[in-house]
Image (tube, helix red, strand yellow):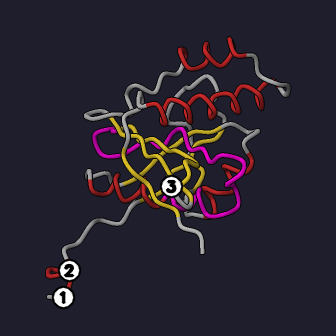
Amino acid sequence: MTTWTTCLTPPDAPDAAALLREYMAEMVRRWYGRPERPEEVTAALAEMPSDDLAPPTGLLLLARHDGRLAGCAGLRRHPDWAELTRVYVRPAHRGTGGGAALLAAAEAHARAAGADRIRLDTRADLVEARALYARHGYVEIPAFNEGPYAQHWFEKLLPALVDDAVARR
């Protein structure tokens, strides 16, 4: 049996920086439809930094599959909602539940922080990501931002956390 675990990690930690670079390399490669150039990845990381994925503005989750570093997901905090970003599972670990594990962990952190919903934007070419979000209850909504690569917008309402003692009354 395989297991997925997640933990909070600063975006500048070595494992986090490596995964964020891999994520961005894949985004560049898929956008241009050819192998990425190192300078393009560096430029993309500078254009869309992840340094806000740390308290108090957000968080970054790293995922491990059977103990091996395998993926990441970030959350940015907004007054009543959270923005999901940087969802990435290394190719060798895809199809083993990593996306679901990252979504569940991100949703739990968002709820604990008081968010009533999660929103995200994604690109049209990331069909696997769009399918993952739809499978997990995210629905397409009108644009909520004007990101340069945003082509589809999703939202998922999060159930309120209820204390078990209160729920039994």
Q: Secondary structure at mark 2?
A: helix
Q: Amino acid at mark 3?
A: Leu
The local crowd at label 3, few if under 14, some if 14 to 19, many if 20 or more residues have their Cα within 10 Å, is many
Quadrant of the image containing the N terminus? bottom right
The answer for how far apart the CA atoms under marks 1 and 3 are is 30 Å
Assign a secondary structure to mark 1.
helix
Q: Is residue 14 placed above or below 68 in the rendered structure?
A: above
Contact between marks 1 and 2 (CB within 8 A): the answer is yes
Pointer 1 or 3: first along the chain: 3
Q: Amino acid at mark 2?
A: Asp
Tell me where residue 137 appears, x and y as whole percent: 55, 63
Among the two numbered marks 3 and 2 on one chain, the one whose residue lies closer to the N terminus = 3
Which residue is at a point 50% across and 55% down the rendered structure image? 102
Mark toward the viewer: 1 or 3: 3
Image vertical order of residue 28 relative to residue 141, above or below:
above
State left or right for residue 59 relative to residue 32: left
How far, Cα to Cα, is label 3 from label 2?
A: 25 Å
**Residue that label 1 marks:** 168
Q: Which residue is labeled 3 in the image?
A: 102
Q: Nearer the viewer, mark 3 or mark 2?
A: 3
Which residue is the extreme one toward the front?
A: 67
Q: Position of residue 96 (x, y in %)?
A: 66, 63
Distance between the Cα atoms at labels 1 and 2? 6 Å
Magenta segment boundaries in residue numbering:
77-103
Which residue is at a point 61% across and 13% down the rendered structure image? 43
Circle 2 sits on which residue?
164
Which residue shows up at 46% across the image and 61% down it?
A: 104
